[in-house]
Structure formats: C-alpha cells, structure tokens
Image: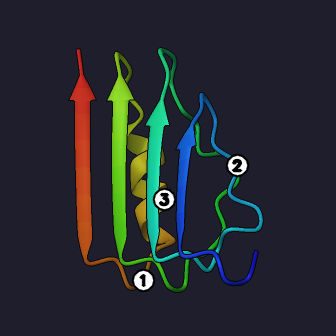
Amino acid sequence: MSKLARASFISMDPLFNGIDNVEFLSITTGFTEASFNVITVFTNIIHIELTFFYNDCWDGVVELLRHCPKLQILSIIKVC
C-alpha cells in the first residue's frame, strides 16, 4: 500500500501496519478504551481525525501523536 494517501478505521484497537505513509488518518473507536498498542512512525501524516465513543484513551492519543512528526491538523471528537 505504498501509494495509499488516506486511511479510515472504525475499530476497538486500530492496527497500523502497512499504512505508515498516509497523509490523512481517521480513527473511530467503539465503546471500550482504544489502546493504540502497535504504533508505527507516520512520516508523512499531516491530518488526523479521532472520534471516541464513551471512552478515555488520552495516553494512547499522546503516544500516537509522538509518532507523527509532520502533523499539522488534529481533530478530536468525544461523543458521550
């Protein structure tokens, strides 16, 4: 998937293998905490949209952001 520019996940625990070159990433998590256990370095990502339903996973968000050196746009939505 070397030419993939955008990726969207609707998942409890997103897996990022093979999408480390995207520029846009959208993650929607379910009703339990997303752990972001396996995070690669996103060398090209400039825009992330995160949507959380009834959970708190701020440690995982901080870890994800540490792996995005070119990030310019961050959108976080928490639905209660």
- Tell me which numbered mark, 1 or 2, is placed earlier along the sequence: 2
**Is 56 displayed left or right of 37 in the figure?**
left
Label 1, on which residue?
A: 69
Tell me which amino acid carries mark 1: Pro
How far apart marks 1 and 3 lie (CA) works out to: 10 Å
Dot 3, how many residues are within 10 Å of its Cα: few (below 14), some (14-19), or many (20+)? some
Q: Residue shown at 54%/85% (left/top)?
A: 43
Label 3, on which residue?
A: 64
**Is 37 displayed left or right of 63 in the figure?**
right
Q: Residue 24 carries which label?
A: none
Dot 2, how many residues are within 10 Å of its Cα: few (below 14), some (14-19), or many (20+)? some
- Tell me which numbered mark, 1 or 3, is placed earlier along the sequence: 3
Give the structural element (helix, strand or loop) at label 2: loop
How far apart marks 2 and 3 lie (CA) works out to: 12 Å
Query: Quick check: marks 1 and 2 in contact, CB under 8 Å?
Result: no
Task: Locate the N terminus and report the quarter of the image it occupies.
Answer: bottom right
Give the structural element (helix, strand or loop) at label 3: helix
Label 2, on which residue?
A: 15
**Is 54 displayed left or right of 73 in the figure?**
right
Tell me which amino acid carries mark 3: Leu
